Image (cartoon, rainbow, N blue to C red):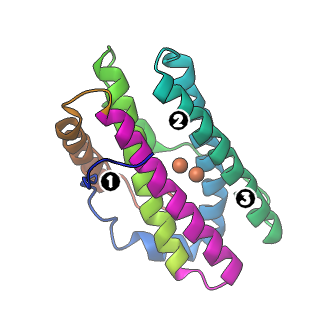
Amino acid sequence: MSLSNAWSLPLVPSDASWLPIALADIDAVMRDHLHCERKAATSALSLLRSYPERADVVEWTVRLAHEETRHVVQVAQLLNRRSQTPGHDHGDDYAAALQKHVRKTEPGRLLDRLLVFAIIEGRSAERLAMLAGALTEPRERLLYENLADAEFRHRDGFLQLAAATDELWKSRAVELCAHEAAILARLPVVARIH
Ligand SMILES: [Fe+2]
Ligand SMILES: [Fe+2]
């Protein structure tokens, strides 16, 4: 699935302090990353539960869940190679704050859920690409490059579904990106993916 036009989410760049903070505790970032991939897989399946009548959403989300589950395996293997034990999920204040902007009733609710997924994929992709650019171990670098590419594709897949859901998708995406920028500005910068 590819976007029919070249429109992209207007996400602000991450704060310049994020990468050095992340690199200073890269073990914590990778442990958090495992849970991010797990949550991406389960969240994708939640769309299947909510919208079984939307064949395009179902086809996309089941493939996505499969791919995110593969990412869970890849990050678990990475932790294993680094002799790291996975940690507990510390929650994700960023994603929780974004979810508060999802409307409670349809038809707006589906559009907002798709756009929030697109934003989280886009933000994750940006940060995984930053990590890829900074990691020195070749296998780790390649893994993060590939995962960043995948999350950029996922962002665009969610945007494609949003475009098929509501003709006002771009203006709502701009609104939600402004909320995301405010959330990032409010939350502390920590050694996690978000
Ligand atoms: Fe992923
Ligand atoms: Fe993803």
Q: Quadrant of the N terminus?
A: top left
What amino acid type is highlighted by mark number 1? Leu
Label 2, label 3: how many angstroms apart (C-alpha)?
21 Å
Q: Position of residue 164 (x, y in %)?
A: 32, 31
- What is the magenta segment's predominant secondary structure? helix
Is residue 120 visible in the rendered image? The answer is no
Q: Position of residue 27 (x, y in %)?
A: 66, 68
Q: Which residue is mark 2?
A: 60
Closest to the observer, 29 or 154: 154
Q: Nearer the viewer, mark 2 or mark 3?
A: 2
The local crowd at label 3, few if under 14, some if 14 to 19, many if 20 or more residues have their Cα within 10 Å, is: some
Report the amino acid beneath label 3.
Gln
Q: Is residue 169 visible?
A: yes
| Amino acid tagged 2 | Trp
Q: Label 3: which residue?
A: 74
C-alpha span from label 1 to label 3 = 28 Å
- 10 Å neighbourhood of mark 2: few (<14), some, or many (≥20)? some
Assess whether residue 80 is covered by the magenta stretch: no
> Callout 1: 10 Å neighbours few (<14), some, many (20+)?
some
Considering only vertical position in the picture, is 192 above or below 143?
above
Q: Which residue is mark 1?
A: 184
Query: Marks 1 and 3: which is nearer the front?
Result: 3
Cα distance, mark 1 to mark 2?
28 Å
For mark 3, give the secondary structure. helix
